[in-house]
Image (spheres, helix red, strand yellow):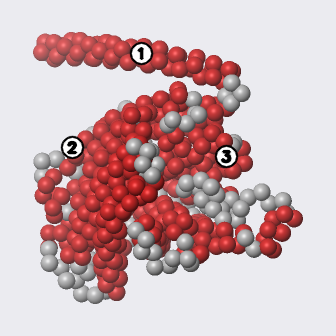
Amino acid sequence: MSDARTSDVRGTASSRRKTWITIAMAVLILIPSLYGFAGKFIEFVHIYRGTGGGEFAVAPILNYLLASAGFFCMLLWAAWNGMFRDVEQPKIDFLENERLLDRRGPAA
Amino acid sequence: MSQSRNQPSARAVPADLVDEKIVIAYYMAALTFITISMLAGLLVALQLVRWNPFNGAELLSPGRWRMIHTNAIAYGFLANAFLGTLHWAVPRLTFHKVASKALSWFIFYAWQVIVLATAAGIVIGPTLQDQPWVMELAKQTHLPMGLGAQGLEWGETPFWIDPVALLGLLLVAVNFMVPIGRSKGPMYVTLWYFMAAFVWTFLTYAMGNLLPEYAVAGTSAGAIGGLFIHDLVGLFVTPLGWGLMYYFVPILLKKPIWSHGLSLVGFWGLAFFYPLQGIHHFLYTPIPMFLQYGAVISTIAVELVVATVVINFFGTLGSKGYDQFVNNLPIRYFYTGMVFYFITCFQCALQVTLTFQKLIHFTDWVVGHAHLVMFGVFSLWLFGIMIYLFPRLLGRPWYSQKLLTYHYWLSAGGLFVMFLDLTLAGVFQGWYWASLQPWDASTNGSTPFWIVRVFAGLAMFGGLLCFLYNLWMTAKGAESVDESPALAAAAT
């Protein structure tokens, strides 16, 4: 019983450490990325406003945003619906299903 | 193992889950078009060394048949082979049939008409356009576009085919999305790739074929063209190709992929990094520099994503990888393609830098790079899949394993020689141009490389003939002349 409690405490501490490391790594990556992105976004706005041919910049950016926005929504939808909760299970299910189909014969 | 939530019972699966006839029909169409494409490629290769046997024949002019070469491989071979394989993989992955069998056959015939009409437009269109009655008709109807090819790499499909092709792509998406939508639980990575491909292919085709024709012009149209040609590889061919690798490799190795989590990192990485990188085809142009830098950075980022995918597959191959590579023929095709893919992307990460571009832009380096990805990767993968599936579809083993091995070595070897040859040719051409020597100096200097390219192409075509003869004998039911039981067992 006592061993189980010690193991629980260790597990909680390890989980907390992982959470902090994840947050620290996320901040470490996000801050320079956001800084870079903001800089480029300001440059983009200046180009769009400053020249007659600002659409040079807008056309590909809009294309990218249209494609990426859809996939960003899909990523959120997938996470919300638990698609990444048991992330390794689909690879097991898929092979089991294939074996099931093969047992039924080639027509399946 | 206990039944999981994504595993339906055997009774729930329809008896005629896969329509095998349509898979065979697509493969036959694909093999017909790759034969035409390779013959067209040989014609262009012969023209470059001034051995063109059809010199002066307008309808066989290399300028037109170069476009047949690229269109037949992309829309004739790759699209048909992918569609056939999707008819096998999607129902088996989801345990649901495609939305409509009749729709599948309609799409099959419609797609062949689209590809043939594209070829007709490219070959006959320019000749027809010069006829006085056609010019008069164009003047009367205020027809703004030509009857022949559109002036966009890989978007040469004549303008009147574009809406039909888009409708076809929409129907393809509907036909396969219905069974995917009906499946329950967290999805296997292959289905993520397939779903993305259905959306991306439609959007990419619409963007590349409609925007430069009707909406944007000048440099902006150039930027769109750059996005189109690259996204056609990255957002149509790549997700289908990798999706199929995630499907077939675990089946053939009889073990799950090393990390499903890592495979999802690869998928989402592709989704967010790939779409912006097409601008890297237009470095040193009036397109704003921040867009050019963005394309360079996203291209290099994709190389990191590709590294995760390749590591995942080699992790799956595991310690007995060499045995599998030697004895399991489809696996040999798949992993050769993966090595070529890694080389392609590594090359991409280097050649998109401004320093590299200065030297290799417009040279044969790019041609070598394109052949490496379209033939060395995706065509080899599709041949590997066909080698695995044909015995199951036809209900008999291959006529000859030796011929399959010849096909592998002639295709992979010929392609690798062609790739090295053209890469080197590109470097030479870049230096010739940089040194401001007369144009003739660069073409004379390129001739030895172009001769090697002819022979490499002949080797690849010889490999294809081995494959076609083998398939013909297998389909005819000729008695198998198997010499290697290990290979035969692995392939069936």
- Amino acid identity at mark 1: Pro
Marks 3/2 same chain:
yes
Residue B394 x %, y %? 35, 77
Residue that lies at the very extreme toward the right in this rendered image? B140
Q: Which one is in front in this view, the residue at disc 3 or the one at disc 2?
A: 3
The quadrant in which the C terminus of chain A is found is: bottom left
Q: Which one is in front in this view, the residue at disc 1 or the one at disc 2?
A: 1
Element under disc 1? helix
Element under disc 3? helix
- Amino acid identity at mark 2: Gly
Residue B211 circle label? 3
Residue topped by disc 1: A32
Q: Would you call the spot at circle 2 few (<14 residues within 10 Å), some (14-19), or many (20 or more)?
A: some
With respect to residue B301, does A20 lie above or below? above
Locate residue B313 relative to residue B105 in the image: left or right.
Answer: left
- The residue depicted at 38 percent of the width and 71 percent of the height is A107
* Cα–Cα gap, marks 1 and 3: 35 Å
Q: Chain of mark 1?
A: A
Q: Would you call the spot at circle 1 few (<14 residues within 10 Å), some (14-19), or many (20 or more)?
A: few
Specify which label sits upstream in the sequence, 3 or 2: 3
